[in-house]
Image (tube, helix red, strand yellow):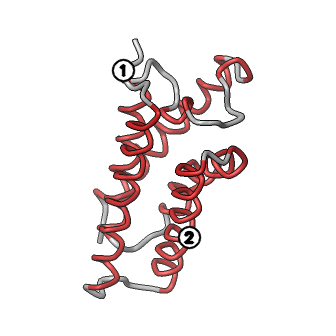
Amino acid sequence: MELIKNVYMIKCLVLMITFGIDMVMIYVLYKKIVYDTYDKIFIYMIFVCHVVFAVAVIGDIQRILDSMHICIFMTPLFAMFLRNYYLKFMVIMLMLIIQMLWIINSNTCILKELPTSFEDEKYDRHTMNILDIYTLWITILMIHSLYNYE
């Protein structure tokens, strides 16, 4: 049972999540609790991705949305090397939200109602299982790194 079908609602939801992440990053920058250059570069790269993502969502630009799918799965890998507690926590929350939305939406991406090349017919269940396992493991590793935070 897919609960989220209205394209306008989907756009609002993903843009609100994106805006919330941006608020956390602005807080981290404003409070000057960024420890090193890597953390700053990560924040600015995410800001750039978010601007591009917002334009793609609002304008229904398929090629950019496809690229953003790749970026969202690469972000946790880069986040493993962050030193800032808040940034790591933010990435963990994003991963958990994505997984919850995936489950709520009948094991499909919430963005599937938007124009992307990632149609369910193009990807077999094996590919999706690999993404499920990757997402689960990266979330566990991020939680472990947060638990062992210095």
Q: Earlier in the sequence, mark 2 or mark 1?
A: 1
Which quadrant holds the N terminus? top left
Residue ID at (35%, 41%): 97
- Relative placement, left or right, of 71 versus 109 is right
Question: Among all residues in the image, which is located at the extreme top?
Answer: 1
In the image, what residue type sits under mark 1? Leu
Which quadrant holds the C terminus? bottom left
The residue that disc 2 covers is 48
- The Cα atoms of the two marked residues, 2 and 1, are separated by 30 Å
Residue ID at (62%, 29%): 130
The residue that disc 1 covers is 3
- Relative placement, left or right, of 4 versus 78 is left
Residue ID at (31%, 59%): 20
Residue 87 location (% of width, % of height): 36, 66
When the figure is inspected, residue 150 is found, relative to residue 138, above or below; the finding is below
Do the residues bearing badges 2 and 1 touch, measured as CB atoms within 8 Å?
no
Q: Residues within 10 Å of mark 2 (few under 14, many from 20)?
A: few
Q: Residues within 10 Å of mark 1 (few under 14, many from 20)?
A: few
**Which one is in front, 9 or 110?**
9
Rendered image quadrant of residue 129: top right
- The kind of secondary structure element at disc 2 is helix
In the image, what residue type sits under mark 2? Val
When the figure is inspected, residue 121 is found, relative to residue 96, above or below; the finding is above
